[in-house]
Image (cartoon, coloured by chain):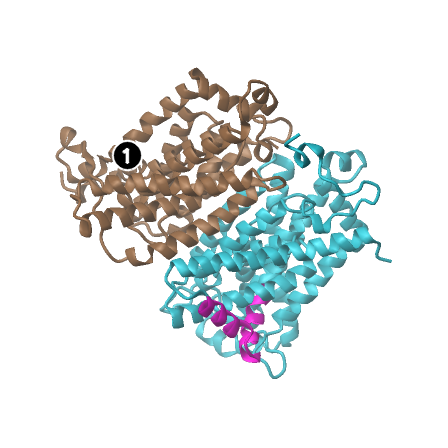
Chain colours: A brown, B cyan
Amino acid sequence: MAAESIGWWGVPLGILAGTLRGSAPFLFVSLGECLTEKSGKINLGLEGTLLMGAMSAYAISYLGSEKWGIPSSISPWLGVLVAGIAGMGMGFIHAWLSQQPKVNDVAVGIAMIIFGSGLAFYLGKPFIQPQAPQLQTFELGGFFTNSPALQSALKISPLFLIGVALAPAMNWFFKSTRPGLFIRAVGDSPDAALAMGVSIKKVRMLCIIAGSFLAGIGGAYLSLVYPGSWTEKISSGQGLMAVALVIFARWNPIQCLWASLFFGGAQAIAPALQAVGIDQGYYLFNAAPYVLTLLIMIITCSPKKTLSGAPGALGTISG
Amino acid sequence: MLNSTNWRKTAEAIAIPIGALLFSLVLFGVFCALAGKNPFEVYGLIYKSAFGNWRAFQGTLLRAAPLMLTALCTALPARLGLMIIGNEGALVIGGLASVMAGLVMSYGSVVPSAEQLKSVSGLPPIFVLLVMALAGIVAGGLWIAAVGALRHYRAVNETISSLLMNYIAIAIMNQLVGGPIKDPGETIKASSYALPDIYRLTNLPSTRIHYGLLYGIIVCAIAYFLIQHTTFGFAARTAGGNVKAARIAGLPVGKLTIIICFLAGSCAGLAGMVEVAAVHGRVNESLVAGYGYTGILVAFVARYNPIACVLVSIVLGGILASGGALQRSLEMPDATALVFQGLVFLVILYSESLYGRLKIFKEPTPKAPVMSPPSTAAPAS
């Protein structure tokens, strides 16, 4: 079966492929945001962190293989690591600033979006042209089918699989470990945490930095896997949508996984339709994830009660 | 009139933002030095190309005009305790609506035929511009009022929803100029039809500054009066201070939220009208120029004071205006302006924690003599 003969089946296939390819950034950022919000702080600036991650991963992957002589199978992984570290740097700024007296964490997030994207565009300017080695993918399609369309749809990145494994791991961490309990205590009732002898500042600092590490890796996925290049338009609000996604997922890492897959699918609608020749409403279908996020927030939020599962100290969201 | 407490408070409110701006300039200098540029050369160039002479200063004022309007979109709801950042979206929707209104007024259709293009209606320009401004105001206002309504009726976080609506607004604009209202004659960039020259916003006499600057200053003055000197403004500030207390006092919090959001959005919508009627003449992707995001920063630096918004817009507008010169003379990427804005924003937020903590601005307490506590004064004993 050739690619052309797939015809209308290309639409669901395209959406499936897009889901497998495009949901990893949502997944990493939402897990990072989930960890951050569990400790009672909100980090709206993960959009900036995502861009910093995407830029630094691409730059290191390129420099590593071209300038430092690292094999091109290893240098992308070095890029992923550096993206995480760059994310931690951004996280440190956010954590320190948002814990100053009278400083609003939502406002810090807005500032970090501007600062992070500015820094990423500034430092990333020389890397727009060159082609960096990409992360390898598992070609699962070969086992099931000979169709090239299906095979290209079923390319799965190991980074995505790590993200999928991370969701239940984080769930277990929150539910069954001592540090997980401390984080939940700090987020739910800081007074109780204080009585347990836990340093609220330190826990929040660590959670925000770890969450930003994950967001940085989500950025690395953008530039090294899919779409797999570095441009100034590489992130189209994924970092921001992930914040809303965490509300939808009720601060549960497992549900973050399902929600990320759902968002990845929504994002793939416009390209899938375009692939079979439907150009009508391309921009509107492209806006589907934003509309979806807004609709989900309208449905799930309620003025009468705080949301179930919301960390008690999370002032801004549980309102 | 001024007692000493007021005097100190005012001094604090002026000195801290200025100090923060200066400190972020220093940080920016360090950034430039790290990037291998001479910071003093950068400062000199910014000053020269933003405020150096009358011609340069006109360019600064041109950029300040939309900024002071978009700043109000964040500043007004902030007085009610809402953090709305949908400025860019409201600007785009306002610009879109006013171009469509303007085209209908001049040609009788949004997609005029060849014959219609030849015959511009003879309506007086002032009337057409007024209708265009109204269209921008109403469209931008409704756009942000929806955010306020969602906040009030569904408790949807206004920061996230307004930011999402920016993306949706840009998608709507792209969709419309890409098809239904597209001018097939314009091949470089998908655009709407152009407004006829007689219905464009003109310049102030013997300058290249358009009347939009006047709109901005007048609207900021009205906003200041509304917030500081009317019962409506007092009610909004009360509700912003403490929602529960305002509810108990019988203030209609929901109505206040939606009205303030409408006013906020209408300011950004007017900014969109100014941009299309004075600068672009049509609506296309150039309308998404980041004025909305810089407007958020202006509102924060001005501490949500509409009059201060005018001054801060001029300062930041000047720095934006110098971006081109930095790019040309020093070969710095255009993202430099974004880095600078981010630095200013972070420093301004940090400075929030300084209010009431700096000794110079504290009321001297005459009763207790200035003395260090014994624990630190005599550690040896």
Name the residue: 23% across, 56% down. A130
Report the span colored magenta. B40-66
Most distant residue in the bottom direction:
B206
Image quarter of residue B155:
top right
Residue B319 drawn in magenta: no
The foreground one among A71 and B197 is A71
Mark 1 lies on residue:
A159
Relative horizontal placement of residue A10, taking residue B328 as reference (left or right): left
Rendering coords of residue B51 (x, y %): 56, 73
Give the secondary structure at mark 1. helix
Relative horizontal placement of residue A25, taking residue B316 as reference (left or right): left
**Kind of residue indicated by mark 1:** Leu
Confirm whether residue A310 shows in the render. no
Give the chain letter at badge 1: A
Image quarter of residue A89:
top left
Confirm whether residue A3 shows in the render. yes
Rendering coords of residue A206 (x, y %): 45, 31
**Mark 1 Cα-neighbour bin, 10 Å: few <14, some 14–19, many ≥20:** many
Most distant residue in the right direction:
B1
The foreground one among B104 and A173 is A173
Q: Quadrant of the C terminus of chain B?
A: top right
Rendering coords of residue B231 (x, y %): 81, 50
Residue B41 drawn in magenta: yes
